[in-house]
Every structure is written in structure tokens, then in C-alpha cells.
Image (cartoon, helix red, strand yellow):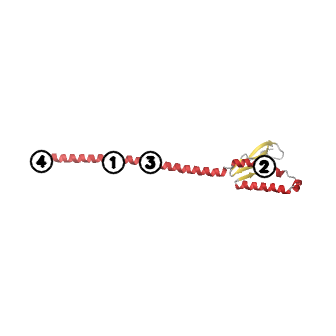
């Protein structure tokens, strides 16, 4: 009978070992679950961090583009307001006769110098004059048709008169050139 007691002891020992192993496995499972939870939380924070970092970079780029655009085109209102001054000076210079030029040479030279300086200032700030010529083709991107008229010897769409020059501010149209366009049908 001593042997069965010995077997019971071994069974109890095996049961205790199995119970200890089960507790250890349960602890390991709890640690694994906790570790997986911590990893998921870490991944979520990493994702948030990366998204925030990307948004900050995008915001920086948008701000830089806005700054560059403001620098390039910020003076467009002022430039539009100065264009009539250019137009009036050009009209004044175009109407000067030879007699007036001889009588008031110094004053006319001053007006011409002022006009050249205005054109130089335009150039410094990226303003270019659009000067279409009679006979050029009408381009709706840079010209504004003020009227259409049939004119013999021209094709439809040819510029027949220039009322006012146009202006570009860098790559943007500031004011279209105002022109008259031929409506003569093709023969």
C-alpha cells in the first residue's frame, strides 16, 4: 500500500506542477495581452505623430506658397491703379506736334524721361506691356475686343485698331489690351 500513496504523491506533484504551469501561462498570456495592447497604443501614437508631422509640413508649404504669391502679386491692385497714369502719359506723348516739341523741348523731354522711368519701375516689379500691332491675330487670352468691324483687305480675327495697351504681372494678366477686331468674312 505504500506504493499507491507514492503514486498519489506523484499525481499531486504533477497536478501542482500543471497548476503552476497554468498560472505561469495565464500570467504570460496576461503579459502578452498587455504587451499587445501597449504595442497597439504605441502604433496609434506613432500614426498620430506621423499625421501631425505631415500636416505641419503641408502647412509650412502652403504658407511658403502664400508668401511667395503675396510677394509676387501683392502689388497688383496698386499696379492696376497706376495703369491709367501710363495711359494718360502715353496719350500726351502721342499727341505732341513738331511745333510743340520745338517750343517746349525741355518739358517734353521731362515727360519722356518720366515715362521711361515708369516703364523701368514696371519692369522691376514684373509688369510687362502688351503692345499688339495692327494686323496681329486677336488672342482672347491677352486681348479684349472693344468692337468688331468689317475692313476690306483683312481677315476675320485680325486686329484693326489698338485702343489701349495691356499689361501682364509676371504670368498673370493685369489688364487685357483693348483692340478693334476685323469681322470680314473669309472670301
Quadrant showing the N terminus: top left
Residue at 39 percent of width and 48 percent of height: 38
User: Which residue is the site of mark 1?
Assistant: 31
Q: CA distance from mark 3 to mark 4?
A: 62 Å
Residue 84 in percent (x, y) is at 76, 47
Residue 45 or residue 173, whichever sits in front:
45
User: Which residue is the site of mark 3?
Assistant: 45
Whichever of labels 2 and 3 marks the residue nearer the N terminus, that label is: 3
User: Which residue is the site of mark 2?
Assistant: 87
Element at badge 4?
helix
Q: CA distance from mark 1 to mark 4?
A: 41 Å
Residue 3 in percent (x, y) is at 12, 47
User: Which residue is the site of mark 4?
Assistant: 3
Whichever of labels 1 and 4 marks the residue nearer the N terminus, that label is: 4
Residue 92 or residue 35, whichever sits in front:
92
Q: Do labels 1 and 4 touch, CB within 8 Å?
A: no
Amino acid at each position: 500500500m505504500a506504493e499507491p500513496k507514492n503514486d498519489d504523491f506523484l499525481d499531486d506533484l504533477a497536478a501542482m506542477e500543471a497548476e503552476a504551469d497554468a498560472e505561469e501561462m495565464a500570467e504570460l498570456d496576461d503579459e502578452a495581452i498587455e504587451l499587445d495592447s501597449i504595442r497597439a497604443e504605441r502604433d496609434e501614437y506613432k500614426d498620430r505623430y506621423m499625421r501631425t508631422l505631415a500636416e505641419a509640413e503641408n502647412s509650412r508649404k502652403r504658407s511658403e506658397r502664400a508668401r511667395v504669391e503675396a510677394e509676387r502679386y501683392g502689388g497688383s491692385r496698386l499696379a492696376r491703379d497706376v495703369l491709367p497714369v501710363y495711359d494718360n502719359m502715353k496719350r500726351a506723348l502721342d499727341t505732341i506736334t513738331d511745333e510743340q516739341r520745338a517750343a517746349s523741348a525741355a518739358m517734353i523731354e521731362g515727360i519722356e524721361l518720366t515715362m521711361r522711368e515708369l516703364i523701368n519701375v514696371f519692369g522691376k516689379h514684373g509688369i510687362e506691356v502688351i503692345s499688339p500691332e495692327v494686323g496681329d491675330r486677336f488672342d482672347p487670352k491677352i486681348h479684349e475686343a472693344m468692337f468688331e468691324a468689317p475692313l476690306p483687305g483683312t481677315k476675320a480675327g485680325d486686329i484693326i485698331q489698338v485702343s489701349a495697351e495691356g499689361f501682364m504681372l509676371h504670368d498673370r494678366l493685369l489688364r487685357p489690351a483693348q483692340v478693334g477686331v476685323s469681322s470680314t468674312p473669309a472670301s
